[in-house]
Image: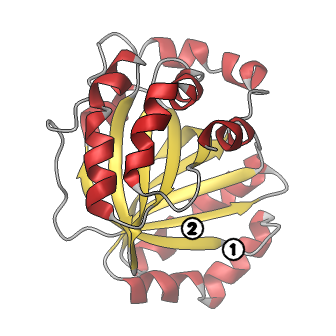
Amino acid sequence: MLRSTLKVCLLIVISSLFSCHQSHRSNQHNRQLSTSHSEGTQPANSLLFVISHHVNDFGRWLQVFKSNDSLRKTYQLSDPEIFRSLTDTLYVMISLQASSIEKAEAFLYSEAQQAALRAAGVTDTPEINFYEPVFNDDRIARATDLRFFVIYKTQDYTAFKNAFDLLEEERKHDGLALVTIARKRNHPNEIAMAFTAEDFRAMDRHLSKSSVQQTLEQAKLTSAPEVIIALKVAHGNF
């Protein structure tokens, strides 16, 4: 079941888009990426505020986003990371550090932010999610801009974690490095993970392996993993 669904999720019509970033990424790949999550950090009292939506012009949207930095600071939102889907280049994801859900929602629904969304050409209602990170490796995050975002939904987080840990050497062999693990606030059995690699085909190869699929059968997943392949295009306050 996982094989057929994942093949749909992992669109492979991205090689032409990816190639234009190779020269930028080549300088970032001088060291070997570790895939062990034992070396990362477990952030204390942090909350990830993730916004995703479509835009009609990415350049225009980015310009408006950068000009809105003071408003985000007013609502205690910091450390923005912007990701652009490789399979749908008008789909944008923004990750921010939030001090509280209340302030993040107040920002999103403020008159100033709503005006900014209109000016930026956002074409659909933003989807928002809040996650509590349980692991993050900044060293890995800085090594490359390519990201595989994978959403797992399970009946049992412990069963999922045990199965996931069994695949650590397999991920290493397949060239995948773990960046972040986060559990959704109010739905802790929904787990968001970010990985990176030097090859945009790495996740497809990994998840298509029968050994990986067999191990994931132990994870008590309620649906097939959802995968988004993206590039980080901006990071930090502007």
Query: Can you tell which quarter of the image residue 123 is in?
Result: bottom right
Q: Residue at image x 58%, y 28%?
A: 208
**Colour basis:** secondary structure
Residue for badge 1:
116
Quadrant placement of the N terminus: top right
User: How many angstroms separate mark 2 from mark 1 (CA)?
Assistant: 8 Å
Tell me which label, 2 or 1, sits earlier in the chain. 2
Q: Nearer the viewer, residue 65 or 168?
A: 168
Q: Amino acid at mark 1?
A: Ala
Please, is residue 120 above or below residue 211 in the view?
below
Q: Secondary structure at mark 2?
A: loop
Residue 144 is labelled as none
Q: Residues within 10 Å of mark 1 (few under 14, many from 20)?
A: some
Q: Residue at image x 28%, y 24%?
A: 169
Is any atom of residue 237 visible in this view? no
Provide residue 44's location: percent of width, then percent of height.
16, 65
Q: Residue at image x 50%, y 19%?
A: 25
Tell me, yes or no, whether the two marked residues, 2 and 1, touch with CB atoms within 8 Å.
yes
Left or right of residue 156, residue 217 in this image: right
Provide residue 33's location: percent of width, then percent of height.
31, 20
Q: Nearer the viewer, residue 236 or 169?
A: 169
Residue for badge 2:
68
Q: Secondary structure at mark 1?
A: helix
